[in-house]
Amino acid sequence: MIKISPSILSADFARLGEEIRAVELAGADAIHVDVMDGHFVPNLTLGPPVISSLAKVAQKPLDVHVMVAPIDHCIDDYIQAGAHYLTIHAEATVHADRALNRIREKGAKAGISINPGTPVTVLQDLLHLTDLVLIMSVNPGFGGQSFIPRALDKIRAVRRMIDEQGLSVELQVDGGIKPDNIFAAAQAGADFFVAGSAVFSQPDYRSVIERMKENGNAGKKARQ
C-alpha cells in the first residue's frame, strides 16, 4: 500500500495543530514538514522549536524535509525536536555518507533528496545508508507548483537501483502530486507521496486522500 504525507507548507499556519489532527483523521500516514532556510531555497519557514511543538500534537510520524545548506551542523537539532524521518539534500552537504550515518545514529530514519537538475547517479553509493529517497518533482522552495514530467524517468531509475541492490528503501515523490497524476508516479516505482495544495486546498481532506490512495495503489499494482 502506498503512503500519503500531507505537507503542512500548504496548511493554515494559524491552525497547524488542528490541521494536523484533521489530515490524520482523514487518513494521512505521516505529516510532511518542509524546513527552508532562505539560502538553499528562496523561502524561509520553520525550525526546530516549531517542530518540537508539532511533535506534541502529531500522532503520525513527522516526515521532516530539510532544505538547509550546510545541513551537517543542525542534524541533531531536528531529530531532538521530533523528526521521525529526516530527509536531507544531496546538494546540501559534501559529506552525505557521514550525514546519513549521523541521522541513523541519533535514532531517526535517514532520507536523502535530489533536486530536478541533479542526476540519480549521486545516490548509487548512498542507498545502503538510507531508509527513504525523495525525488523532487518540482524545484524546491514553494508550494503549489506543477509536476515536472521528467521526474517519472528519475523515479524509474531509482526504483531499479533500489531493487538491484536488494534494499528496503521507501521511494518518495514531492511536488505537484495530485489524484490525476499519482497513478503514473506509483506505476513508475514510487510508494510514498507528499501532497500539499492538493490536500489542503480542498474542503474535504478525507475525500482527496482516499482518491489519491485509490489511484496510487492502482498504479503500484499496474507496476507489479
Image (cartoon, grey):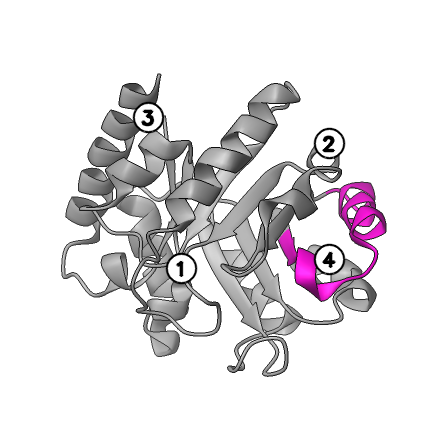
Q: Earlier in the sequence, mark 1 or mark 2?
A: 1
Q: Name the residue carrying label 3.
A: 220
Kindly report the distance in space between the C-alpha atoms of the residues bearing marks 4 and 3: 34 Å
Q: Which residues are magenta?
A: 87-107
Look at the numbered disc 4 and give the secondary structure of its residue: helix
Q: Nearer the viewer, mark 4 or mark 2?
A: 2
**Rendered image: mark on residue 7:** 1
- The answer to whether the residues at label 4 and label 3 have Cβ atoms under 8 Å apart is no
Q: Is residue 10 above or below residue 87?
A: below
Residue 64 shown left or right of residue 128 in the figure: left
Figure quadrant of the C terminus: top left
How busy is the neighbourhood of tag 4: few (under 14 within 10 Å), some, or many (20 plus)?
A: some
Look at the numbered disc 3 and give the secondary structure of its residue: helix
**Rendered image: mark on residue 128:** 2
Label 3 sits on what residue type?
Lys
Label 2 sits on what residue type?
His
| Front-lying residue, 148 or 214 | 148
- The answer to whether the residues at label 1 and label 3 have Cβ atoms under 8 Å apart is no
In the rendered image, residue 32, in percent from the top left (x then y), is placed at 46, 55
